[in-house]
Amino acid sequence: MWQDVVTAALVGTERQSLTFTPPNNKLGELLRRLDSTDAEGSLLSAAGAIALYQKAGQLPVKDSQPLPKECELDDQPCCSSRAGHHLDLMLNGEYKELLPEWLAATAKVGKRVPDLNLPDLLELGRKQSELREAILPVLGKRGYWLASQNLDWNYVVGDVKETWQTGSRAARKLILKNLRAENPSAARERLATTWASEGAKEKVAFLETFQTGLSVEDEPFLEAALDERSKEVRRVAAQLLARLPKSRLCLRMIERSRSLLIFKQEGELYLEVILPESCDKAMSRDAIESKVIHNLGEKAGWLLQMLANVPPSFWCSTWKTNPAQLIQVVDRSDWQSLLIKGWAIAALRHQDSDWAEAILPTVSKLALVSRLYSYLLLTDEQLIAGLIEVLPRDHREAFIRHLLPSNSVGLSSKDQGGFHLLCYYREPWSAEFSHAVLEGVYLYTENSNGVPYWPLLLALKEFACYITPSLTHKAAALSTVAKEGTPWMNAINEFLAILQFRYEMLQALGSKS
């Protein structure tokens, strides 16, 4: 009957009337009542009745698969309902920038997330890979059990052997990263067993895990990776080798560049720069790209890439000088931007704290007017933040605070780069340092006469993520010096709201703020 209805509908009731023999059942009784003089109405009514009849007669599909094994009872205590409420807000987009801190604080006190939040949190981890490591410790047994039921969440590692063979790229990368932290050699050997069959994107992702536990033992594997056809694979391998001062790649870069920089003293110290003549196959193998880098000529771009791979301490030992003196000499050079940025990248790669301290103020100023790092997949922001992390932890705040103004004007861009470094200092601040920053914000707001200083206004939201939450009550004084209806008031209200939320969030977790 259904086919008869479909045929009549396709041909049209003017050309072909609906004819069929109704069955001897309840459906047939209903179809016999249709008004045959109304061709269109009969067709539509018959279609509706038959369709409904078919649906009503369908039996549910039987799943022959066995039920999954029940989740074990969780011995990890759940966080409080108040802490769960804060998590709800962040998963729904409010104060989402604070989620990493909430995850870290929850893991620190040994708690897990409420069961109802597990699907949203697991899905967020699927979309934002940078959160995965922080998510895993707070999932509890139910979170791991739930992830095992959904292939989209297989970044939550279960059976290592099976996941390495069949898991997604993200799941396999997480296995390697965890294994690198425990046993770098075992991780490298595991990767070697499948390396030849991996795609270029997989190879890039897996090589990135070598940043954990990198040592000279990794050099043979990374050196071989320089022979890969993929330019991206060679680039990552070269960046890792550049972090090993005695690697063959570093030695090759030293040989290429040592004759291109000449330190002279004729009346005053100066640095003569000679650009390389060509980029040969050996240089391309070492991931020196021949394309023109933004704001630099082709040959200058080759030199920048070479300098980024040479341990910066090499120049100090060769010329019997120190980083501060070299930077002072370069400040007078036409090649200042190229040399400073090449040395800055090298200081970051080789974790040279002496160079980082000497070069950071200059780098932060240059970052405002030019961007040369895109070819290294490195932004100005990542470079400056990375160099700050190179400084000894107990020295970072003192270094930045020394560059902040000590007068009654408050924070501004005219403070020798201190404000710009402060914007990239992204880790929890001490109470003393937080107090100094709040004082600087207060003084500038008080003296601004309502005129907005946009860099500071935009930075306030970031500052709220790192200032010690226990100073929330002191920060509230900012609202007394900001004029109503001005951008200052709006920015300060947002700043105070984030800081207050952090304070309540950490209090709910029982974490010290």
Image (cartoon, grey):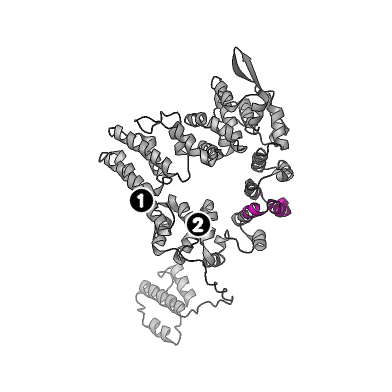
Image x and y of residue 114, in percent: 45, 65
Crowd band around label 2 with a 10 angstrom C-alpha radius: few (<14), some (14–19), many (20+): few
Q: Can see residue 19?
A: no
The residue under the point 57% across, 22% down is 330
Of residues 36 and 384, the one nearer the viewer is 384
Q: Amino acid at mark 2?
A: Lys
Q: Let me know if residue 469 is in the magenta part.
A: no
Position of residue 171 relative to residue 72, above or below, is above
The single residue placed furthest to the top in the displayed view is: 267
Image side of residue 174 versus residue 18, left or right: right
Crowd band around label 1 with a 10 angstrom C-alpha radius: few (<14), some (14–19), many (20+): some
The single residue placed furthest to the bottom in the displayed view is: 24
- Mark number, residue 108: 2
Q: Can see residue 511?
A: yes
**Quarter where residue 343 is shown:** top right
The residue under the point 53% across, 51% down is 130
Q: Which residues are magenta?
A: 177-200
The residue under the point 28% across, 38% down is 481
Q: CA distance from mark 1 to mark 2?
A: 21 Å
Identify residue for label 1: 500
